[in-house]
Amino acid sequence: MPPADQRQAVLRLAANTRGRDFVIGDLHGCLEAVDDTLAAVGFDTSADRLFCCGDLVDRGDDNEAVVALIDEPWFYSVRGNHDQAAIDFLADPEPSDHHRLATTPENLWLRDLCRTQPEQARRVGERLASLPLAISIEGQAARIGIVHAGVPLGMAWAHVLRELEGSDATVVEEVLWTRPMGLPGAPVTLGVDRIYAGHTPLLKPRHAAMFGTSTAVVCTASPARDVIVAGAP
């Protein structure tokens, strides 16, 4: 992902006219799963783009290597709740609820890194802090949104983006923590053709067309096991 201002809450991108766009679910420190999946689809790093639904860290064995993907020009990710917990922990390691995920037994890698390689831990925090809360892809045929968990029900996509850019705490909480998305009969999200989200554990991607609109919510597999061609039915 190209360098981003740490305060950038929303990343807006144009359609990919050179290659394919893929979306993958939460990575949780599992680099091998990424490599295997990209090899299976013949991913071309010179033309294709990979979008991740966040939660790059925790649980897996390759957290630092997965975070390093942020520096790749073909990789884009939103921020997940585990990423935010790591950011909060690195900013203030004193015990508190706001970074409880970073201090559970499965996530000891971060505390160990702070103790043994504090400068590397600082760089991890900077990379994670550069992740936007939402990505909006302006396609010629479709507008695509990517968030980690979900969006406020009934709120138009443009409104969601404005609230995120204004640091509205309620909307930030929704995109990082809410679940599940795409419930039948739920109020629609206007102004976007497809929203991709992770966060909720699933064995396979779930497509949930929202009633009364062409908007489709796609909950990716979590942990990541599949990639989806962005915009594909």
Image (cartoon, grey):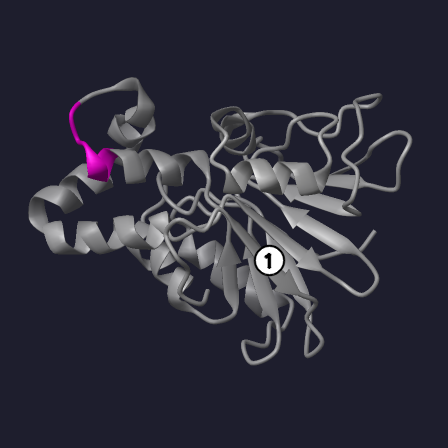
Identify the residue at the far left of this view: 116
Q: Quadrant of residue 155?
A: top right
Identify the residue at the far right of this view: 212
x and y percentages locating residue 156 in the rendered image: 73, 35
Secondary structure under the numbered disc 1 in the rendered image: strand
Q: Is residue 224 visible?
A: no
* Residue that appears at 34% across and 33% down: 85
x and y percentages locating residue 25 in the rendered image: 56, 46
For the image, the number of numbered tags is 1
Name above or below for residue 21 compared with residue 100: below
Q: Is residue 194 visible?
A: yes
Three-letter code for the amino acid on which mark 1 is drawn: Arg
Left/right of residue 202 with respect to residue 233 in the rendered view: left
Queried whether the magenta region covers residue 18, the answer comes back as: no
* Residue that appears at 59% across and 41% down: 162
Q: Which residue is mark 1?
A: 12
Which of the two residues, 83 or 28, is positioned nearer the viewer here? Answer: 83
Left/right of residue 217 with respect to residue 78 in the rendered view: right
Name above or below for residue 54 compared with residue 203: below
* Residue that appears at 66% across and 44% down: 196
Name above or below for residue 119 compared with residue 185: below
Left/right of residue 203 with respect to residue 59 in the rendered view: right
* Residue that appears at 11% across and 49% down: 118
The boundaries of the magenta stretch are: 89-94
x and y percentages locating residue 88 in the rendered image: 28, 34
